[in-house]
Amino acid sequence: MTTTLSSSATALDQHRERNTDQEVLETLRKRIADAGVEYLYYQSVTVTGRVVGKVVPAEQLTRNAEKGVQMHRTVMADFQVTRDGTLLGGGVEAAEFTAVPDLDTFAVLPWDPSVGRFFCRLYEPDHRPEIGGRPLATDPRGNLRRLHAAFTERTGLELRSGCEPEMTWTGPGLEVHARPDSSPAYRLDLLERSRPIYQKVISYARAMGFSMIEGDYEDPGQVELNWMFDHADLTADRLITYRQICRQVARELGVTASFMPKPATGMMGNGCHHNISLWRGDENVFAEPGRRELHLTELGRHALGGILTHAAASMAVMGPTVNSYKRYWDSGQFAPAQINWGMDNKTCTVRLSANGRLEVKLPDAMVNPYLSHAVLIAAMADGLENRIDPGEPQQGSSYDTQSRFTKLPLNLGEALELFVADDVIRDALGAETVELYHAYKSDEWARFCGYVTDWEHMMYKEDTP
Ligand SMILES: NC(=O)CC[C@H](N)C(=O)O
């Protein structure tokens, strides 16, 4: 059942050569000068989805476009030292890597136009000839691009995706007294209180090239703003940028922007549903042109079958934190709890939300979008190749504990065991990334398992056995 999509030498990896194209560089230098940009961030994204990078004075562009900037590879696991004292990602002795800017990703920071930024593609260092110039195996962004290109090369299909990040804003003036018997969702007077937030976020996002489409207020403090779907590689970059924008807006307004998946029991979690479709050129192959009633093509059913087959093993990516699992298990809050699908059914893992669109509801707002989209591509490729049948759609709510559908893993620990055992996912992300992610997250899980919580105090402090 293993589908090999890895491709080491796609055109995308020749991007370093393009960075020496004098015409391209001249156009960019002019753009940078016209915008008054003096500093450039060379940013990368770690396996856990954090943004790291260096600042470079803009006049160094030509040099750095070719040579990149260097960082220590343990940065890809956030310099995490595990409980047994291991520095993840190769230890102090490990080689550096080279971050080479993707020139197409240049953007000016709207909140300070003297600063511009690039996303980078990561490579083994040139001064280590035995490995030099190869893509860095633990670069999740570079990996998604290579994997996606290989998938398109093989199937003629492209993944388009639209992410719906939910998040919680707290701070002065944002307190909400919610009635216990109803939800404040869609209340305009609450959205009004968040006006300075959404106005700034939308205007910064627009300035950075997003096509913003709509937004709403959901549970207390929870605001969701959406932008237009696109090629999955671009959507993943935008989700990272969106979080950076929100953090900036929080700093400016003196409030807190939280992507924590489940901030409070009994309230909705912060999901980040991925609305996906596969395209052949301009044709969405999940729908039949002109057919109006809700339906999914045979190809779409196989893609869905692949997603459901690998859903449990993908959970360590889709719900990447200890806290993520509270979102699935505090039932009845529109988050999935079973591995199933349904026609316009918001309680399922995958909802056919419109013709040509599958809404994958597992991911939460802390997801690393490069990993999640890579996993979805590999799962769908497996579904297509092996013509996996997704079974019958769920009728009615999934929050019925008697459901015949398979349950999702209960916690991060269980999810990690399934994650490392799935060959399709291992092949998609690469063994090194799987091992690094697994080591990092297992350490997070172990720390939590040894941590005494308020809940235990509430239950046991004054209890008599
Ligand atoms: N609008 C919705 O469907 C709510 C989704 C829900 N907040 C989740 O955790 O996924």
Image: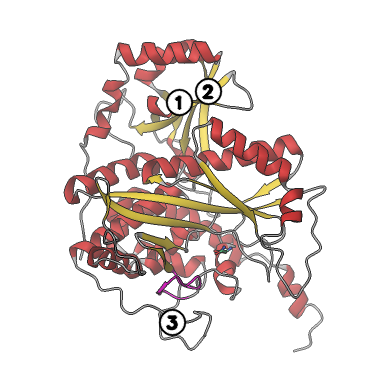
Which is more N-terminal, label 2 or label 3? Answer: 2
Q: At 27% from the left edge and 46% from the top edge, which residue is drawn?
A: 282
Q: What residue type is labelled 2?
A: Gly
Q: Which residue is the site of mark 2?
A: 116
Rendered location of residue 208, percent (x, y): 52, 31
- What residue span does the magenta drawing correspond to? 338-349
* Residue type beneath disc 1: Phe
Name the quadrant where ligand 1 sits.
bottom right
Most common secondary structure along the magenta stretch: loop
Front position among marks 3 and 2:
3
Q: Does the magenta stretch include residue 345?
A: yes
Residue 238: x %, y % from top left: 48, 40
Callout 1 secondary element: loop
Q: Are marks 2 and 1 in contact (CB under 8 Å)?
A: yes
The amino acid on which the numbered mark 3 sits, given as a three-letter code, is Gln
In reply to whether residue 140 is colored magenta, the answer given is no
Residue 237: image quadrant is top left
Q: Which residue is drawn at 69% across and 42% down?
A: 197
Q: Give the class, few, some or many, for how many residues have Cα within 10 Å of label 3's Cα (few <14, many ≥20).
A: few
Which residue position holds label 3? 395
Q: Where does label 1 land, which residue?
A: 106
Neighbours of disc 2 within 10 Å: few (<14), some (14-19), many (20+): many
Q: Earlier in the sequence, mark 2 or mark 1?
A: 1
Q: Which of 349 and 183 is in front in this view?
A: 183
Q: Is mark 3 within 8 Å of ligand 1?
A: no
Where is residue 30 drawn, in percent x and y?
44, 11
Q: In which quarter of the image is the N terminus?
A: bottom left
